[in-house]
């Protein structure tokens, strides 16, 4: 049973969050990505996502918005997370894998925007998000 089915059993819709991160600071890019994630949520029948942003921060700086998001996931407050791509969690595979493990452990569904390559092919996505290592 996935996070959406559990939320439905409780009579509540999935609780959705979006996570954005850019380094260096990029207000224009963040706004465009936010709009795209809002559209992705709507395409999947999800409510408007609660926004978590670490704009201008490197992983080494600490990511307070990501930390808060993962605490909300662990507490069961968020059942779906939308991201523009897995790169927002870090550029090193182990950084991304650690976030994916937390999401998977708590039954949280992860949706990402299709890549440029997938959009050029006319497909909706690049396929499933890889499982955490």
Image (tube, rainbow, N blue to C red):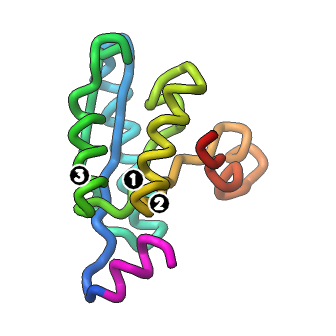
Q: Quadrant of the C terminus?
A: top right
Report the magenta stretch's main SS. Answer: helix
Which of discs 3 and 1 lies nearer the camera? The answer is 3
Q: Are marks 2 and 1 in contact (CB under 8 Å)?
A: yes
Relative vertical location of residue 88 with respect to residue 125 in this rendering, above or below: above
The residue beneath circle 1 is: 81
Looking at the image, which residue sits at the far right? 121
Q: Position of residue 35 (x, y in %)?
A: 36, 47
How far, Cα to Cα, is label 3 from label 1? 11 Å
Q: Which residues are magenta?
A: 1-9
Identify the mark nearer the N-term, 2 or 3.
3
Q: Residues within 10 Å of mark 3 (few under 14, many from 20)?
A: some
Q: Position of residue 31 (x, y in %)?
A: 31, 35
- Mark seen at residue 109: 2
In the picture, measured across the screen, residue 96 lies left or right of residue 78, that is right
The residue beneath circle 3 is: 72
Q: Position of residue 77 (x, y in %)?
A: 23, 62
Question: What residue appears at the point 45 percent right and 30 percent down from the top-left corner?
Answer: 88
Relative vertical location of residue 61 with respect to residue 96 in this rendering, above or below: above
Identify the mark nearer the N-term, 3 or 1.
3
Q: Secondary structure at mark 3?
A: helix
Q: Secondary structure at mark 1?
A: strand
Question: What residue appears at the point 44 percent right and 43 percent down from the top-left corner?
Answer: 83
């Amino acid at each position: 049973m996935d996070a959406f089915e559990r939320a439905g059993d409780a009579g509540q819709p999935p609780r959705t969050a979006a996570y954005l991160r850019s380094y260096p600071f990029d207000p224009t890019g963040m706004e465009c990505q936010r709009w795209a994630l809002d559209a992705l949520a709507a395409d999947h029948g999800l409510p408007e996502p609660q926004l978590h942003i670490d704009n201008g921060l490197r992983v080494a700086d600490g990511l307070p918005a990501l930390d808060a998001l993962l605490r909300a996931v662990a507490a069961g407050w968020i059942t779906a997370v939308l991201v523009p791509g897995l790169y927002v969690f870090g550029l090193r595979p182990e950084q991304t894998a650690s976030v994916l493990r937390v999401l998977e452990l708590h039954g949280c569904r992860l949706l990402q925007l299709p890549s440029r390559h997938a959009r050029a092919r006319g497909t909706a996505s690049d396929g499933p998000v890889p499982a955490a290592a």
